Amino acid sequence: MRPLASTLGIALLLLPACRTAAPPVAPPTGAAAAEAAPDPAKQYIDAWVKARRGDTEGALRVFRALDAAGWEVPPDPAEFPALNESAEFAAIRARISARAPRTALSDVAVEIPEEGLIAEGIAADPRDGALYVGSIAKRKIVHVPASGAARDFAAGEASGLGEVLGMKVDPARSLLWAVSNVKAEAAEAARSTLQAFDLASGALRVTVAIEEPKHLLNDLAVADDGSIFVTDSEAGSVLRLPPGGARLVPHREGAFTYPNGLVIVDGVLLVCDALGLWALDGEGAAPRPLLAPGGFPLGGIDGLSARGRTLVGVQNSLGDSRIVRFDVAPLARAVLRAEVLEAGNPLWHIPTTGAFRGDEYLYIGNSCLDAHRDGEVRAEGRVPTRLHRLKIAS
């Protein structure tokens, strides 16, 4: 999940990452690489970097290679203003667009009538089907019951919330975990915070903060023992809060390029970043790259949800947004299948994260992240928030 997003997508996503994060380990070479095509996300990012630096020929060279390899995610022209006068770029984009998957479109399951939330994070309680939606602009969490009207769950100064990003329900302990961030301003110092709220009362139970700049807590995963794993996007790291702990400790530092969503599958922590999907087999372990059949791109995913060994995420930072599904092998040794579940929905306005609720995947369809600037929400963002629904077969 990323509060930086706009129509520039990957551009804004990568600005902090390029400054602070060391790259992950290189993907395998030789015989191992021959078994699966490399994730092309890095090539797309390379094209953006070249275009931003004025190397339009270099960017076009990358797009020629992507086009020749069958790339099927149309680049957003707003991400490549330096190429928009190029007839060749227009022709490449047209060919890529013609290859893009045509899918059925999801329905809108819930509409939150309050305008201007700039919603980014979402979590589901498996016990009663309630949803929790985080707001960046209003620095609060909204409770959406399975039936009935939405209401504030945690809000105001007493909540201690900043701009809310990732959230997860821990049903075993009846807690809602959330991360939020405050940017350094005249009235407030920079702060990145992990908090837990009692699901029954909304009372604040846990607060753990990093009170310094160049951190951005982004998403989290809850382990069976109650440990909480958190991505720190600007530091390129994964942190951990031990059960009953009072501070976040390093789990794997500086190993990722803007890490975002993470899930736990068969006890293995999976982390998505700008470049791909990585497995952490233990504390301090080097990230293990996962590759998908046919070179399907695994990078640029905003949030990640798991149901068993099925992963679903919103891939919104490698061109036009789409909802993707990955099925992984036991112990997350490989991605066995990858597919696009939805693309090209005209109701979308920067779709962001989702959550499983039984056989449904519910996600925020119109975050309107690009309408939030300098604490203000422009007119296009002052709209109700739509939660879309996809049925996910086993």
Image: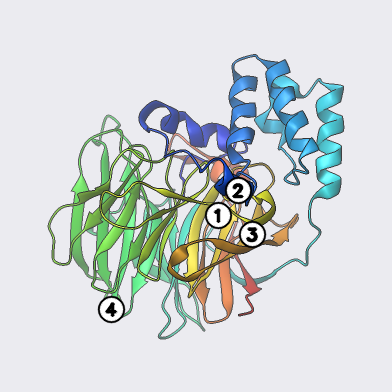
Residue 261 image offset from top left, x and y in percent? 44, 54
Q: Residues within 10 Å of mark 3 (few under 14, many from 20)?
A: many
Q: Which residue is at the front of the view, 20 or 148?
A: 20
Q: Nearer the viewer, mark 4 or mark 3?
A: 3
C-alpha span from label 1 to label 3:
10 Å
**Nearest to N terminus: mark 4 or mark 2:** 4
Label 4 neighbour load within 10 Å: few <14, some 14-19, many 20+? some
Cα–Cα gap, marks 2 and 1? 7 Å
Placement of 15 over or under 181, stated as above or below: above
Q: Earlier in the sequence, mark 2 or mark 1?
A: 2
Please determine whether, in this image, residue 54 is positioned above or below residue 113. Answer: above
Label 2 close to label 1 by CB (< 8 Å): yes
The Cα atoms of the two marked residues, 4 and 2, are separated by 31 Å
Under circle 1, the secondary element is loop
Instruction: Give the image quarter of residue 222.
Output: bottom left
Instruction: Give whichever of discs 4 and 1 has the lower sequence position.
Output: 4
Task: Tell me the residue that label 2 is attached to.
Answer: 316
Q: Which mark is residue 323?
A: 3
